[in-house]
Amino acid sequence: MNFTKSSHQYLLSGKTLCGEYGQLAMESLIRTLGIVVLTAQAFGLAAAQAPGPTQPNTAANCNKWYLVKAGDGCATAEAAGGITADQFFEWNPDVSRDCVTNFTGGYAYCIGVGAAASTTTSKTSSTTSKTSSTSKVSTTAPTITLPYSTRFPVTTWDITIPTIGIDFPPKETQAGQPTYCIDWHFVTGADSCQTIVNRYATSLRMDDLLDWNPGLLDDCSGLQVGFWVCIRIQPEASITLTFNPTGPPVLPTESPYTPTTFPPVDTSFTPTPTQGPLPKGCLSYYLAKAGDRCDQVLAAIPEITSEQFFAWNPYLNGDCGALWADNYYCVAVQGVVIQPETVTGKPSPTPAPPSATNCAAWYQTSGGDDCDLIVAMFGRFKKADFISWNPAVKSDCSGIKDDVYYCVGVPGTPTTRTDPVPTSSVTTIPRQTGIAKDCVSYWQVST
């Protein structure tokens, strides 16, 4: 339907209503259809006009705008309008919360709004009599602010994403960065100095970020979208050297070395006093303290047995109730090899498959131990016995391992050496220098 008015003529769907009756008919039709006549004032711009293109869903009653420039972010627009982020995104709903989508340079964004548009419904009154008719139409034009995009429609729209350079080191960096910066962060619209520090919290502090990027200023107001900020620098090390160019170099005074002096070995040492006569050829002694018993001696020297201790100190007669304080007792004699330390309770780790279930003594191997060496050290069982008690070592003893406990005795196995100490000819083995000339027995150290 369209209508025009000229000299009391109304054109309705191609038909003309003339004169006063035509005017009354048209006014009646307007009242019947509820048409509100809008004047040119209704389309006036009640709010401030945007300085550039806007997004489609920008607030209709916006009266304050911010035109985005290169390097701006949402926070820049919010600061310019003195508004909160929630207000900005409410009035600019097309912009994503991370400020990456639909926040474009050259576009205007709302940073202030006025009163919402209002519409007053028109009222009509009519008085009709038999001889005359009076009709009156009253309208109040609403205040409507049309969006910028309606007034100036966009025919083409290219959505662009900020270009991130691939050069390394990056070229688009904020001014003032140190030349020894080795890592950077690309700033997006959602970034602030605090979010950057939070992201790299394990290696970056706020003081570091501001020191390495002086262009940010102390309040971080200089942060620019699309630029790189320094977040890590090359470790710095410095050393201060004193150099005297006018004279010879000064060297520190040398401190003379004084070796530690040890008392000479008394080869004629005779232990005294003793509780009784000591065996000939005793090589090592134990000085008893007040309250000592045989238990304390064996705990201090676990390599010997109680049988050996009583044999080398026969005057005890097997009674070790109390030793005499400050007296010497024999704990090793020439020709007797001290037994390696063993434990009686089942230790850990033990080999797999397991050793003899009735094992009474365990020995922990160390570097270089093999079956032959273990048999020679103990001298109280044969190699076949050792292999039968410990099947994990295999028949050729290739399965023996370091730091593992192996069985070295079952009930009935002697507790002292029964085999003679192995000897070697001095002409067939290497010897360390300084060995006594009259030495008649040697022990070969394994690797």
Image (tube, rainbow, N blue to C red):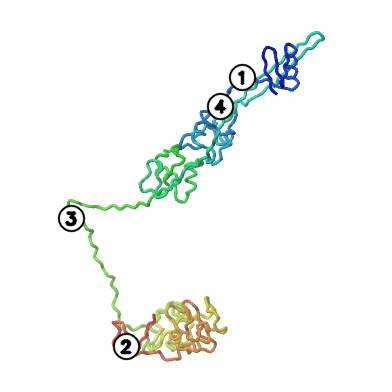
Q: CA distance from mark 1 to mark 2?
A: 129 Å
Hey, what amino acid is under mark 4? Asn
- Which secondary structure, mark 4? strand
Side of 272 relative to 248 (left or right): right
Side of 103 relative to 327 (left or right): right
Identify the residue at horizontal 59%, vertical 36% (top origin): 93
Side of 45 relative to 309 (left or right): right
Badge 3 vs badge 2, beta-carbon distance below 8 Å: no
Residue picked out by circle 2: 439
For label 3, the crowd category at 10 Å Cα-Cα, with few meaning under 14, some 14 to 19 and many 20 or more, is few
Q: CA distance from mark 4 to mark 2?
A: 112 Å
Q: Earlier in the sequence, mark 4 or mark 1?
A: 1
For label 4, the crowd category at 10 Å Cα-Cα, with few meaning under 14, some 14 to 19 and many 20 or more, is some
Give the number of the mark in front: 3 or 1.
1
Q: Earlier in the sequence, mark 4 or mark 3?
A: 4
Farthest residue toward the front? 14
Residue picked out by circle 3: 248
Q: Is residue 57 visible?
A: yes
Residue 326 vertical placement versus 385 (above, below):
above
Q: Earlier in the sequence, mark 4 or mark 2?
A: 4
Farthest residue toward the right? 130
- Which secondary structure, mark 1? helix
Badge 3 vs badge 1, beta-carbon distance below 8 Å: no
Give the number of the mark in front: 1 or 2.
1
For label 2, the crowd category at 10 Å Cα-Cα, with few meaning under 14, some 14 to 19 and many 20 or more, is few
Residue picked out by circle 1: 41
- Indicate the position of residue 362 as horizontal and vertical percent values: 51, 81
Q: CA distance from mark 3 to mark 2?
A: 59 Å
Q: Earlier in the sequence, mark 3 or mark 2?
A: 3
Residue 328 vertical placement versus 218 (above, below):
below
Q: CA distance from mark 3 to mark 1?
A: 97 Å
